[in-house]
């Protein structure tokens, strides 16, 4: 132990749900570094709510694997950051404890669902933060807040202790102001964990390199087409031009399976969520129901009142999609569509090293702008393909549109997280 | 109309707890039965948010042993699925089980059919799953009723063995279960004496009618009882011209009856889907490295060959692992000399006496049993005295008294068989004849029954010590002396 570190943040953006005022400072790679942790990652002795009323008061008796790794590396847990309830959202407005504001423009959302982590980093309250990315939840707020965020390859970081929303899609990943910071944090959290059967023995020991000479970059037409703000597209194209100046070449490509990607994504994540969130039945968590009522009525009351509207919507969608007679039409079909996405990526990656495009189709929304769930779901179109395929993807700031940050997204082959980090690093070094 | 005397058709779904040291998806100990509630739990088996399952390799190995012993095919790729339903004992609100990709398919188990001889009961599948927790119902009418949850049991590995509808009577169903238990015990993967280690659901129909599922059977005897009740119930309905509903019924063990489950309980839609936190199971290649021990059928054949047991005795003795081991221990010193008597005395007498006392074989000392068989073999005591000695032995164990050797019991009770020149026997015969002139008269008049009566009287006086053969000769001589 190297003493105590004091933390007195000015949380004017509602980035944190709980903060530590002081914490032990360990020794190691992250000695003296305050790390913010998204509140869907279990922390022993620190309330972990997933921004849901149903988990208010829940204090995990154990640390998530990544939290143990942070502590072992000497980091200090700064606190738990706000999110869309259980990670379900793209704005961090779906929090039971109020929205987080975008530090770049407080009339706008920070993106989501890791909006609290992104805002805490963007506002300079912490150097780095952990987020989770199920369909873009690290990359979206990184893009909207003008910071760097990495969604690692599926299996590279243990999910043990991450309160599951959609197990087959999500990964814990780092957010930071620079690619180097993100890379350092990735080095701490990656690696095999016997408690997560889906984790891989692929540790990350990498120092970013800026040399991308000869790199082949695929530019999918779908990432610059319908639904993508032309101004955002132009900023990203310019950034890709910068990569070409650094010695990379671009190759046009197409991901036809993207037509079904969003549907496949929402069927999969809502199905898994309906099962994951079923344990919140009033017996062990949340406000006690009226047990004078029958069991069925009692748990329905709790679930009806303690979950937010978006969570209830997704549970209902997922329950429907898994129902007898519909499983084949929805869940099974979604897995086929998912395989098609993976095959499209495999095909493209035979010819190119990385794929580049915008992270989000627009800049950060105004607060309450996305009141209609469908238009919010559409905003995930450019981020969900990487989750469906399990491949690594990073968002790095690449300029502004209407004064708001725009993110350049670099996707890579499975387990080539190092390469997407290098490309982001090359860009970052070139423009700074 | 269906024939009320039509063929009974039974299929079973048997859930057995695998006797591993730790649970199916975490490191918690499975040895919870003597400990307080919720003492063998961790974030994983409590289903705490964020905890993930990690498969216990041993449980899969045990399940594969069973599959191999039951002649099943291990599939190339098995998969775990989630079975979703709300119940307070199910901490995650889903059970991790296997659905459309079970570990093993096919296979069979041979049982003794009602017609005699062996018959094969085909198996559909074997799959692995986790046990839920347990509700403990508390309170009373005045203070209100409530339930507490104990998650010690949550995550204990189970296998579910599903049979084809190949059994033709409740008795065959029980035989299937007994044979299955024996096989699992021979494999050392199952302990039938642990409370709740076995649960059975049975499907039963009368040929031509709908089938009924009977749930909640938790004992070996219960299967036969529940199904016998169902056969009677269904046949009576058919006789009255009524239709049998396809339904689920619960077996109420205490009352020995089945009761229709509420229709709501039958409307479950379990919304199965593959468990995303576990990877597909590709373990077929392990099969060859699994070495099976001697199984009940092989041991039965060996007992007949090696010890000269009758088929019936061999079947009984090998029908339970402990019993088979016990027999072999008893006769170990002198297999050739002791086996014939030991087989009868264990398979027939000892089992009866144990059942009568509801006593476990564990409490019987094999050495004492050997001693008893030796006394019988040497002709030191009569069969009747043998039973008396056995009862004293068992009662001493049961009451926790100091255990005497069979020799000591015989000595203390003076049970040594009366020899021909034994004064006590001669005196007893004299007494019996003198006290029963009527019997003497009857015998004189040629009524054979009177001799049996006199034998009985002598036996009574000697408290069974008299060797019946010797007694008969001596009594006949005594009567001859009197000129009868």
Image (cartoon, rainbow, N blue to C red):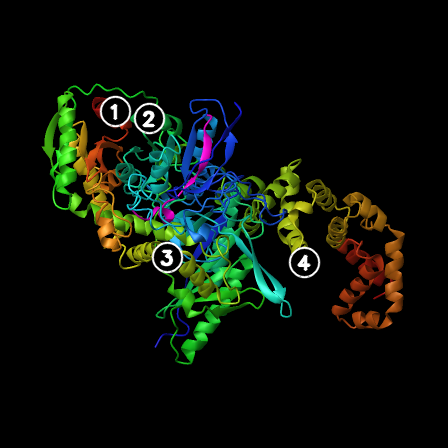
Q: Is residue B52 magenta?
A: no
Camera-side mark, 1 or 3: 1
* Residue that badge 1 annotates: A425
Tell me whether the residue at label 1 lies in contact with that at label 2, contact meaning CB atoms closer than 8 angstroms: yes
Give residue B440's position: percent from left, percent from top: 83, 69
Q: Residue at x 81, y 47 (%)?
A: B409
- Left or right: B124 as drawn, with respect to A258: right
Please tell me which residue lies in front, B445 or A248.
A248
Residue on which disc 2 sits = A183
What residue range appears in magenta? A74-90
Report in which chain the residue with disc 2 lies.
A
> Which quadrant holds residue B63?
top left
Name of the residue lying farthest toward the bottom:
B240
Tell me if label 3 and label 4 are in contact, CB under 8 Å: no
- Tell me how far mark 1 sits from mark 2, CA to CA: 10 Å
Q: Which residue is mark 3?
A: B270
Tell me the number on the disc at residue B356. Answer: 4
């Amino acid at each position: 132990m190297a003493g105590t570190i004091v933390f007195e943040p000015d949380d004017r953006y509602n980035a944190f749900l709980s903060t530590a005022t002081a914490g032990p400072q360990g020794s190691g790679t992250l000695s003296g570094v305050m790390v913010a942790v998204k509140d869907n990652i279990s922390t022993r002795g620190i309330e972990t709510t997933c921004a849901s009323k149903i988990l208010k008061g829940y204090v995990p008796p154990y640390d998530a694997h990544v939290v143990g790794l942070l502590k072992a590396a000497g980091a200090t847990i700064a606190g738990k950051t706000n999110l869309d309830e259980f990670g379900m959202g793209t704005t961090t407005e779906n929090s039971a404890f109020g929205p987080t504001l975008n530090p770049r423009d407080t009339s706008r959302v920070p993106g989501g669902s890791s909006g609290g982590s992104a805002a805490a980093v963007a506002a300079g309250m912490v150097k780095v933060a952990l987020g989770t990315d199920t369909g873009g939840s690290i990359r979206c707020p990184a893009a909207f807040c003008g910071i760097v965020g990495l969604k690692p390859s599926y299996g590279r970081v243990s999910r043990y202790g991450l309160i599951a929303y959609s197990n087959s899609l999500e990964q814990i990943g780092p957010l930071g102001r620079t690619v180097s910071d993100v890379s350092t944090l990735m080095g701490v959290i990656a690696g095999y964990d016997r408690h997560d059967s889906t984790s891989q023995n692929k540790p990350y020991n990498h120092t970013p390199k800026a040399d991308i000479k000869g790199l082949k970059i695929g530019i999918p037409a779908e990432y610059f087409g319908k639904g993508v703000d032309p101004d955002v597209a132009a900023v990203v194209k310019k950034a890709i031009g910068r990569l070409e100046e650094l010695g990379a070449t671009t190759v046009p490509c197409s991901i036809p399976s993207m037509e079904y990607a969003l549907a496949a994504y929402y069927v999969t994540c809502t199905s898994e969520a309906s099962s994951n969130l079923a344990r919140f039945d009033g017996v062990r968590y949340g406000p006690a129901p009226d047990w004078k009522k029958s069991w069925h009525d009692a748990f329905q009351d709790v679930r009806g009142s303690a979950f937010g509207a978006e969570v209830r919507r997704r549970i209902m969608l997922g329950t429907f999609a898994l129902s007898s007679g519909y499983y084949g039409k929805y869940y099974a079909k979604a897995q086929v569509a998912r395989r098609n996405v993976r095959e499209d990526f495999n095909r493209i990656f035979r010819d190119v090293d990385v794929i580049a495009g915008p992270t989000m189709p627009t800049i950060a929304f105004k607060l309450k702008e996305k009141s209609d769930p469908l238009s919010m779901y559409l905003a995930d179109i450019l981020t969900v393909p990487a989750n469906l395929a399990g491949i690594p993807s990073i968002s790095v700031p690449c300029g502004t549109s209407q004064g708001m940050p725009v993110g350049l997204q670099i996707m890579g082959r499975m387990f080539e997280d190092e390469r997407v980090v290098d490309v982001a690093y090359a860009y970052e070094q070139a423009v700074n | 109309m269906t024939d009320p005397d039509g063929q009974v058709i039974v299929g079973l779904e048997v859930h057995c707890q695998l006797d591993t040291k730790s649970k199916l998806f975490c490191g918690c100990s499975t040895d919870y039965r003597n400990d307080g509630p919720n003492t063998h739990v961790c974030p994983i088996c409590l289903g705490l948010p964020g905890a993930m399952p990690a498969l216990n390799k041993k449980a899969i190995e045990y399940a594969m042993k069973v599959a191999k012993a039951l002649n099943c095919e291990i599939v190339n790729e098995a998969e775990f699925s989630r079975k979703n339903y709300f119940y307070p004992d199910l901490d995650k609100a889903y059970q991790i089980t296997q659905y459309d990709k079970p570990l093993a398919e096919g296979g069979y188990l041979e049982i003794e059919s009602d017609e005699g001889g062996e018959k094969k009961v085909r198996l559909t599948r074997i799959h692995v799953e986790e046990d839920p927790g347990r509700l403990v119902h508390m309170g009373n009418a005045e203070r209100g009723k409530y339930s507490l949850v104990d998650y010690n049991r949550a995550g204990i590995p189970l296998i579910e063995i599903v049979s084809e509808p190949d059994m033709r009577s409740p008795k065959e169903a029980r035989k299937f279960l007994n044979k299955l238990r024996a096989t699992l015990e021979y494999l050392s993967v199952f302990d039938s004496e642990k409370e709740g280690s076995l649960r059975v659901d049975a499907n039963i129909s009368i040929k031509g009618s709908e089938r009924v599922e009977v749930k909640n059977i938790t004992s070996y005897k219960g299967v036969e009882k529940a199904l016998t009740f169902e056969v009677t119930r269904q046949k009576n309905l058919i006789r009255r011209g009524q239709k049998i509903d396809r339904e689920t019924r619960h077996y109420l063990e205490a009352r020995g009856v089945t009761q229709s489950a509420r229709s709501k309980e039958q409307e479950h839609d379990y919304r199965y889907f593959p468990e995303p936190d576990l990877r597909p199971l590709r373990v077929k290649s392990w099969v060859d490295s699994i070495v099976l021990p001697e199984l009940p059928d092989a041991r039965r054949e060996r007992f007949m060959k090696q010890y000269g047991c009758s088929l019936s005795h061999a079947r009984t003795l090998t029908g339970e692992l402990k019993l088979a081991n016990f027999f072999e221990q008893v006769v170990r010193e002198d297999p050739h000399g002791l086996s014939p008597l030991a087989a009868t005395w264990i398979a027939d007498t000892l089992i009866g006496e144990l059942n009568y006392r509801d006593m476990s074989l564990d409490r019987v000392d094999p050495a004492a049993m050997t001693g008893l068989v030796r006394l019988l073999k040497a002709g030191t005591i009569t069969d009747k005295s043998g039973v008396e000695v056995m009862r004293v032995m068992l009662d001493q164990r049961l009451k926790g008294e100091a255990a005497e050797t069979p020799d000591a019991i015989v000595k203390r009770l003076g049970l040594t068989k009366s020899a021909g020149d034994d004064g006590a026997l001669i005196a007893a015969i004299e007494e019996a004849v003198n006290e029963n002139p009527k019997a003497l008269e009857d015998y004189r008049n040629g009524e054979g029954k009177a001799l049996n009566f006199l034998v009985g009287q002598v036996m009574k006086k000697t408290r069974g010590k008299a060797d019946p053969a010797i007694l008969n000769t001596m009594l006949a001589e005594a009567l001859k002396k009197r000129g009868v």
